[in-house]
């Protein structure tokens, strides 16, 4: 059953959600931290993304479809963790700063 939410509930549960994401991210980071001797500066996920650029999106889709049928809370945490990985890969550093600047400029218009 879906529950109703409001800003108060979202604020109350956000820290708990973030802790679950951190657990998932830490577990996965440890599980897949094998270093490839050819690319010592990359984790396994980085290497896989280099070989299969849409790996993260495809994996998210797998968990999304499984959530649709199984309603496993863990799958939502995995999806959120992969969103974080995508954010790290595409929107940190200079790109992130540029996107924030553009977003703020659009809000002023």
Image: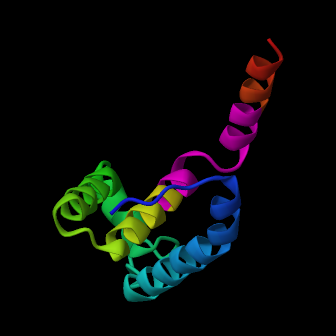
36 in the magenta segment: no
Could you tell me which residue is drawn at 69 percent across and 69 percent down? 12
Q: Position of residue 20 (x, y in %)?
A: 52, 79
Q: Which residues are magenta?
A: 85-100
Furthest toward the right, the residue is 108
Report which quarter residue 108 is drawn in: top right
Q: Position of residue 48 (x, y in %)?
A: 31, 63
Compared to 88, does 37 lie above or below? below
Q: Position of residue 100 (x, y in %)?
A: 74, 35
| Pick the front one: 106 or 16 | 16
Main SS of residues in magenta = helix
Furthest toward the left, the residue is 69
91 in the magenta segment: yes
Furthest toward the top, the residue is 109
| Pick the front one: 48 or 1 | 1
| Pick the front one: 74 or 26 | 74
Q: How many marks?
A: 0
| Pick the front one: 36 or 22 | 22
Could you tell me which residue is drawn at 67 percent across and 73 percent down? 15
Could you tell me which residue is drawn at 39 percent across and 62 percent down? 79
């Amino acid at each position: 059953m879906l529950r109703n939410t409001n800003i108060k509930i979202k604020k109350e549960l956000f820290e708990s959600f973030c802790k679950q994401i951190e657990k998932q991210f830490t577990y996965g980071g440890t599980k897949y931290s094998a270093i490839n001797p050819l690319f010592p500066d990359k984790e396994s996920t980085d290497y896989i993304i280099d070989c299969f650029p849409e790996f993260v999106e495809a994996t998210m889709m797998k968990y999304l479809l499984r959530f649709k049928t199984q309603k496993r809370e863990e799958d939502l945490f995995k999806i959120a963790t992969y969103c974080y990985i995508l954010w790290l890969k595409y929107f940190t550093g200079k790109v992130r700063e540029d996107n924030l600047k553009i977003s703020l400029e659009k809000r002023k218009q």
